[in-house]
Amino acid sequence: MSETPLQSEEIERYARHIVLPEVGGPGQQKLKRARVLVIGAGGLGSPVALYLAAAGVGTIGMADDDQVSLSNLQRQVIHGTADVGRDKLESAASRIVGINPHVSFVPHPLRIDEENGAAIVGGYDLVIDGSDNFSTRYLMADLCEAARIPLVTAAVQRFSGSLTVLAPHLTDAEGRLNPRYRDLFPEAPPPGVVPSCAEAGILGTTTGALGTLAANEAIKLICGLGEPLIGRLLMVDLLAPRFETIRYRRPKSA
């Protein structure tokens, strides 16, 4: 793929990236070419989209069908008080363009399902799932595996969260296919077992921390930096605070 030239204003904007040998001009060009889909314009999707825009990801798609409410503002930092009652995607678009006019924002004002999901996901290089329910997480894992694109998936509850990267279409260093979401969570918990944020509450900074880490994984994948969380689940406890990582693999028979 040919390189995308950076304008002089972009070179100044991304100077702190470009000076990093691990990123440099080639990495910034990869970010500019990248197309990333963010599922949800809420607590996780907010910091994800803000940091991707600031980093210079060329195209950011976002799927959400909700409106901004006053109770969102404690954690959904992409929205402001004046946005209450506004469609979340309209609010997010205004903020992203305000952060970086070089970014193209693509709204998907709907809830992704089995019927519309494949066509939407297929238009992107990478997906970040910031949804708040297991059915969407399983669906996004299936759609991304079918489209053969990586998925960064995060979840939060109260003062803690988890994060992993799924790329089951690729193999590890041993030539073994990477694990699927169901290798980590074979079945969704029964309804009512895991309370929603509205029921259990959530510290706003919990979504900020996990959303920022999810954006970081996306940037790593795009630029080819470090070791992505493939086959590893990062668990974060912000009260301790404590960060732990567990490894998981695909069964040999799968």
Image (tube, helix red, strand yellow):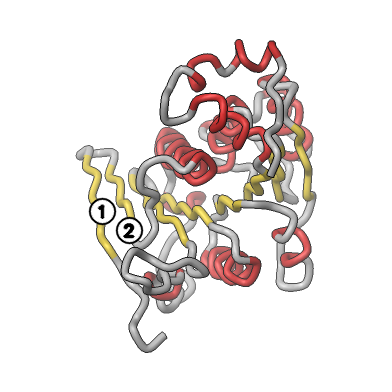
Q: Residue at x 71, y 19 (%)?
A: 98
Q: Tell me the amino acid under the disc marked 1.
A: Thr
Residue 76 place in picture, x, y as percent: 57, 35
Q: Residue at x 54, y 57 (%)?
A: 150
Residue 63 place in picture, x, y as percent: 71, 50
Q: Residue lying farthest front?
A: 2
Front residue of 148 and 60:
148
Front residue of 161 and 48:
48
Q: Which mark is residue 245?
A: 1
Residue 173 place in picture, x, y as percent: 33, 64
Q: Quadrant of the C terminus?
A: bottom left
Residue wearing tag 2 = 232
Q: Residue at x 77, y 55 (%)?
A: 110
Task: Identify the element where label 1 is drawn.
Answer: strand
Q: Residue lying farthest bottom?
A: 253
Q: Is residue 21 above or below residue 143?
A: above
Horizontal relation, residue 159 to residue 87: left or right: left
Q: Is residue 161 at least partly visible in the picture?
A: yes
Front residue of 193 and 23:
23
Question: Which mark sits nearer the N-terminus, 1 or 2?
Answer: 2
Horizontal relation, residue 250 to residue 14: left or right: left
Q: Is residue 71 at least partly visible in the picture?
A: no
